[in-house]
Image (cartoon, grey):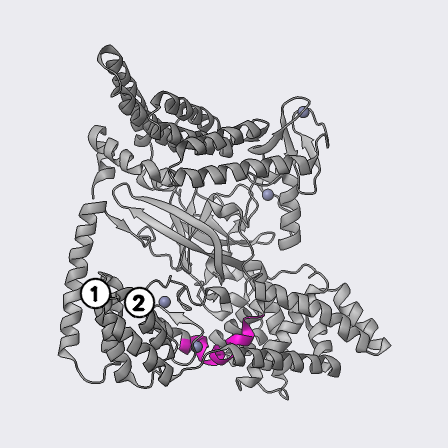
């Protein structure tokens, strides 16, 4: 799970370039200013919190104004030079090529050119668009991509002025094929779905996107927080929320729907005006257009440089500038009154979120202000504000506040994939680590941080889901991690990170008791106890209190080498080079002997078991699988689901092992397999479906076997899992 190593998605290459540029610019500006102004500017940016003063200073200074204007024009010109425009002539050219490929049955090539053509097409000619979409749909039909095909047909019907009876018939045919195709897939591969089925949420009047098992509460020292109002079993969905604002990285514009962040695979729907972004269907295009894209569309080439500024601008556009000024003028309802109200998804709620109130580092704070000034200039271009009006600076202050809120409350959007195995009600949840954007969730911003949280985050496109990772008792607070977890960072590192990024001293249970990250520590050279490594390179032994007895850099180098070996061995494994893969794993194992890196060691033993299994060396495979069980028992407990999954693996290995023998030995192995299986089934019985869903996800390789075993040997209780 990558829960623990999130990265800040707002730091795109463009933003880093922008920071670099503004760091130079501030020197350049300082050199030009009068002595008096120099002192003032230094004072403003070197040691104060970001706010009104800085914006006022920058807005009133003619030299800065000139620089803003110059940079703004450079951005506009480069984006004009690079951006392709709608071009009907080019579009027809592409569509002709597409047609040729279509006739020659180069279907995939045809799709590529249809896409290029559609991107350049002017959406004013609706009849033409409808015709092209129908043509693309026909190819998708031949490719058996019925779901994608259906979206094109529906859009074709929407844009067609005449009534096409054949289009309606086409839709009917494809719908039938889709049903048939899904049934066939189901027979062949078992029921699988890409979307997470959220059925666990029941109505919550106070928090519309939360389960009725939780409520919002208020206390003077904590502010608003989320509390369980009934016992919540492990694996329960507590929140499932759509983003209030979502921002896609510019490098991902071609790969995801700009509005709903759904992955673009074969086809897409274009923006009516630009060729920069793509949508999954015309509905997303319309919604984005009406909410904010109509204003920003022509300026994406400029906005992409200042990620924070872009999100702040989107917030303003979605809520409406006049509305925002009005709401910001009102005195806010005291936070203590919030638990009595409905928590609506609107700007009013967004305005009530906490903001980062620490010091922004110098000259990064200048970068932020410069971004705000550029957005102001853009809003002027969009005819939404005028420089003469007094709202001009007000919007500037509001944007600084917005940026502080975004900084504190944003979540990364990850490119996550779901595999839904209904038979076991198991969600195998694989998140790749590439973040594709950032989102703000209003109610999911309420849970507090703990280094030992009781809920975890799961993403599905721009939707955020929080599920419980253990049983939560009535009255207990719902917590998530804002990145540090006691199992992935030392006490010192956690405190440091949270103070730097969220300006608070963590007093969670794990921190009050100074829980250390023993699972990733080095073995103390004096007493073999866990030696804790801090990222400031200090280290100390939990057992004998020895301090700084090893070289941090050397240890990290060793650890990285073991990681490299594991990566390489996985590659070899995928290429079916089992012997070579195993050799590297054994080397990595040797290095990790001097670490208490349980998770890595479990991973290695598990991989070794698989290598041996493929080499048909079942005896050794069993040895490694049993080692996995021992370590899992230490970490997760003897009757944990982790152990149950590995027990089933052992039983599978015994089953295979027995076939290589005859007579009495075979009987012995059969007996052993049965014992493993029964132990596993006994553990499974104690858990609910949803618990199995969370834990078994890591063992997806053996899931078909788990299902098979439960079906074949499980009693009535476990048979419930197998019902399709
Ligand atoms: Zn979409
Ligand atoms: Zn556009
Ligand atoms: Zn803590
Ligand atoms: Zn020691």
The numbered mark at residue 245 is none
Q: Among all residues in the image, which is located at the extreme front?
A: 104
Task: Give the extent of the magenta segment.
Answer: 289-305
Compared with 144, 119 (above or below) is below
Q: Among all residues in the image, which is located at the extreme bottom?
A: 388
Q: Nearer the viewer, residue 254 or 62?
A: 254
Where does residue 84 sit, x and y in percent of width and height? Answer: 46, 79
Q: Is residue 406 visible?
A: yes
Q: Tell whether position 298 is magenta.
A: yes
Picture residue at 67% right of the left edge, 69% below the top: 21
Q: Nearer the viewer, residue 114 or 16?
A: 114
Question: Which corner quadrant holds the C terminus?
Answer: top left
* Image quarter where ligand 2 lies: bottom left
Where does residue 215 sit, x and y in percent of width and height? Answer: 44, 53
Which residue bears the numbered disc 1?
141
Identify the mark nearer the N-term, 2 or 1: 2
Picture residue at 33% right of the left edge, 48% below the top: 419
Where does residue 373 sit, x and y in percent of width and height? Answer: 64, 77
Q: Tell whether position 24 is magenta.
A: no
Q: Secondary structure at mark 1?
A: helix
Compared with 40, 386 (above or below) is below
The numbered mark at residue 109 is 2
Secondary structure that dominates the magenta span: helix
Q: How many numbered markers are drawn?
A: 2
Q: Nearer the viewer, residue 270 or 246?
A: 270
Compared with 641, 1 (above or below) is below
**Is 135 on the left or on the right of 464, as rendered?**
left
Q: Nearer the viewer, residue 145 or 199?
A: 145
Quadrant of the image occupied by residue 472: top left
């Amino acid at each position: 799970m990558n829960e623990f190593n999130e990265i800040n998605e707002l730091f795109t290459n463009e933003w880093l370039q922008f920071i670099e540029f503004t760091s130079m610019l501030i020197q350049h500006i300082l050199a030009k200013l009068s002595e008096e102004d120099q002192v003032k500017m230094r004072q403003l940016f070197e040691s104060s919190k970001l706010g009104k003063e800085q914006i006022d200073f920058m807005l009133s200074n003619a030299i800065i104004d000139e620089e803003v204007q110059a940079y703004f024009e450079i951005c506009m010109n480069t984006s004009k030079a690079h951006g392709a425009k709608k071009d009907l002539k080019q579009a027809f050219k592409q569509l002709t090529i597409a047609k040729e490929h279509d006739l020659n049955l180069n279907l995939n090539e045809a799709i590529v050119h249809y896409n290029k053509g559609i991107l350049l097409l002017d959406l004013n000619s609706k009849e033409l668009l409808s015709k092209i979409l129908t043509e693309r749909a026909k190819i998708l039909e031949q490719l058996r991509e019925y779901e994608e095909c259906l979206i094109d047909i529906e859009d074709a019907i929407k844009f067609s002025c005449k009534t096409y009876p054949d289009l309606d018939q086409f839709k009917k045919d494809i719908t039938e094929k889709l049903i048939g195709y899904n049934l066939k897939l189901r027979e062949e591969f078992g029921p699988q779905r890409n979307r997470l089925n959220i059925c666990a949420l029941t109505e919550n009047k106070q928090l519309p996107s939360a389960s009725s098992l939780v409520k919002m509460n208020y206390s003077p020292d904590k502010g608003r927080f989320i509390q369980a109002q009934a016992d919540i079993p492990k694996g329960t969905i507590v929140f499932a929320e759509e983003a209030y604002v979502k921002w896609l990285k510019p490098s991902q514009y071609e790969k995801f729907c700009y509005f709903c962040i759904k992955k673009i695979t074969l086809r897409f729907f274009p923006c009516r005006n630009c060729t920069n972004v793509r949508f999954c269907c015309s509905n997303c295009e319309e919604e984005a257009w009406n909410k904010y894209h109509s204003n920003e569309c022509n300026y994406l080439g400029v906005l992409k440089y200042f990620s924070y500024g872009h999100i702040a601008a989107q917030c303003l556009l979605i809520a409406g500038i006049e509305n925002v000024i009005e709401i910001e003028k009102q005195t806010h309802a005291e936070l203590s009154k919030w638990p009595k109200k409905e928590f609506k998804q609107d700007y009013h709620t967004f305005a009530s979120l906490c903001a980062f109130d620490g010091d922004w580092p110098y000259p990064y704070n200048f970068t932020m202000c410069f971004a705000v000034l550029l957005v102001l200039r853009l809003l002027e271009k969009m005819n939404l504000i005028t420089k003469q009006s007094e709202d001009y600076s007000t919007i500037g202050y509001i944007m600084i506040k917005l940026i502080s809120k975004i900084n504190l409350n944003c979540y990364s959007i990850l490119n996550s994939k779901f595999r839904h195995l209904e038979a076991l009600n198991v969600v195998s949840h694989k998140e790749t680590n590439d973040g594709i954007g950032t989102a703000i969730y209003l109610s999911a911003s309420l849970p507090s941080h703990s280094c030992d949280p009781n809920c975890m985050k799961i993403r599905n496109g721009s939707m955020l889901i929080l599920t419980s990772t253990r049983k939560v008792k009535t009255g207990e607070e719902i917590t998530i991690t804002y990145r540090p977890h006691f199992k992935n960072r030392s006490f010192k590192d956690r405190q440091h990170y949270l103070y730097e990024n969220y300006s608070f001293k963590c007093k969670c249970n794990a921190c009050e008791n100074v829980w250390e990250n023993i699972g990733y520590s080095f073995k103390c050279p004096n007493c073999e106890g866990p030696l804790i490594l801090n990222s400031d390179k200090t280290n100390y032994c939990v057992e004998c209190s020895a301090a700084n007895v090893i070289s941090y850099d050397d240890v990290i180098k060793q650890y990285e080498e073991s990681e490299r070996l594991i990566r390489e061995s996985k590659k070899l494994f995928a290429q079916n080079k089992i012997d070579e893969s195993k050799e590297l794993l054994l080397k990595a194992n040797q290095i990790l002997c001097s670490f208490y890196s349980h998770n890595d060691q479990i991973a290695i033993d598990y991989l070794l078991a698989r290598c041996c299994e493929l080499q048909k060396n079942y005896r050794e495979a069993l040895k490694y699988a049993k080692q996995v069980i021992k370590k899992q028992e230490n970490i997760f407990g003897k009757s944990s689901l982790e152990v149950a999954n590995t027990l089933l693996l052992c039983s599978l290995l015994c089953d295979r092992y027995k076939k290589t023998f005859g007579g009495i030995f075979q009987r012995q192995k059969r007996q052993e397999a049965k014992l493993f299986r029964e132990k596993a089934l006994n553990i499974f019985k104690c858990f609910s479906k949803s618990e199995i869903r969370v834990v078994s996800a890591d063992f997806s390789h053996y899931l078909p076997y788990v299902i098979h075993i439960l079906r074949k040997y499980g009693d009535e209780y476990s048979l419930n899992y197998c019902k399709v």
